[in-house]
Image (cartoon, helix red, strand yellow):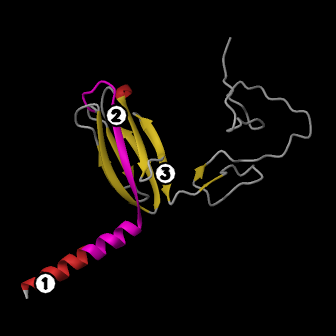
């Protein structure tokens, strides 16, 4: 009887792991510290839509470490903060193919959604995709049919955009 109970327990565990792995996105967090003494109290956290911390980790010591998480479908707030020497902290969140999904340092606050739906997120674009949750820079706009002016005093304005396919970016300078 004990053998049958053990066998059923093992089978249930395998089935549960298989179901869990199919309903989440496995990710790897690579953590870096440029000084080599860990993150000095900074934490990397993923907070679900209810405000609960779903995953939290840190680099306790050294210049490099990894951790992994499997995120169920949904959107998450990404936060990396809470400690000192933040300019030493950096990280990459990668998928199982080694593709960088998100990267940053400390302090950092942003969001990420799974499944990742890439597309144009600007409602003013011709190819706006209301289902997209990550902007892939593919937005297409009509040509400007009349003369227009833009001051560029507080950014590139609403008329102009950077072409994501070029290697030259506009910057605002003063003086």
Q: Position of residue 96 (x, y in %)?
A: 41, 53
10 Å crowding of disc 2: few (<14), some (14-19), many (20+): many
* Cα distance between the residues tagged 1 and 3: 42 Å
Q: Position of residue 44 (x, y in %)?
A: 35, 43
Question: Mark 2 near mark 1, Cβ–Cβ under 8 Å?
Answer: no
Left or right: where 46 falls relative to 123: left
Q: Which residue is mark 3?
A: 112
Helix, strand or loop at label 2? It is strand
- Determine the image quadrant of residue 5: bottom left
Left or right: where 131 falls relative to 113: right
Q: Residue at x 91, y 33 (%)?
A: 147
User: Is label 1 or label 3 in front?
Assistant: 1
Nearest to the observer: residue 150 or residue 101: 101
Q: Which residues are magenta?
A: 14-38
Q: Which mark is residue 32?
A: 2
Left or right: where 149 falls relative to 88: right
Residue 68 against residue 43 in the figure, above or below: below
Q: Which residue is mark 1?
A: 5
Residue 65 against residue 23 in the figure, above or below: above
For marks 2 and 3, the one nearer the N-term is 2
């Amino acid at each position: 009887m004990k053998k049958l109970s053990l066998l059923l327990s093992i089978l249930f565990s395998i089935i549960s792991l298989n179901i869990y792995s199919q309903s989440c996105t496995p990710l790897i967090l690579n953590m870096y510290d440029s000084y080599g003494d860990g993150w000095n109290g900074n934490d990397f956290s993923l907070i679900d839509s209810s405000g609960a911390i779903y995953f939290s980790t840190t680099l306790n010591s050294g210049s490099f470490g990894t951790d992994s998480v499997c995120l169920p479908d949904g959107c998450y707030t990404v936060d990396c903060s809470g400690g000192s020497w933040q300019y030493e902290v950096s990280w990459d969140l990668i998928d199982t193919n080694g593709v960088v999904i998100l990267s940053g340092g400390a302090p950092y606050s942003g969001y990420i959604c799974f499944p990742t739906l890439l597309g144009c997120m600007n409602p003013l674009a011709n190819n706006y995709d209301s289902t997209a949750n990550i902007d892939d820079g593919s937005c297409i706009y009509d040509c400007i049919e009349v003369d227009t002016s833009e001051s560029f005093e507080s950014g590139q304005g609403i008329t102009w955009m950077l072409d994501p396919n070029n290697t030259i970016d506009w910057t605002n300078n003063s003086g």
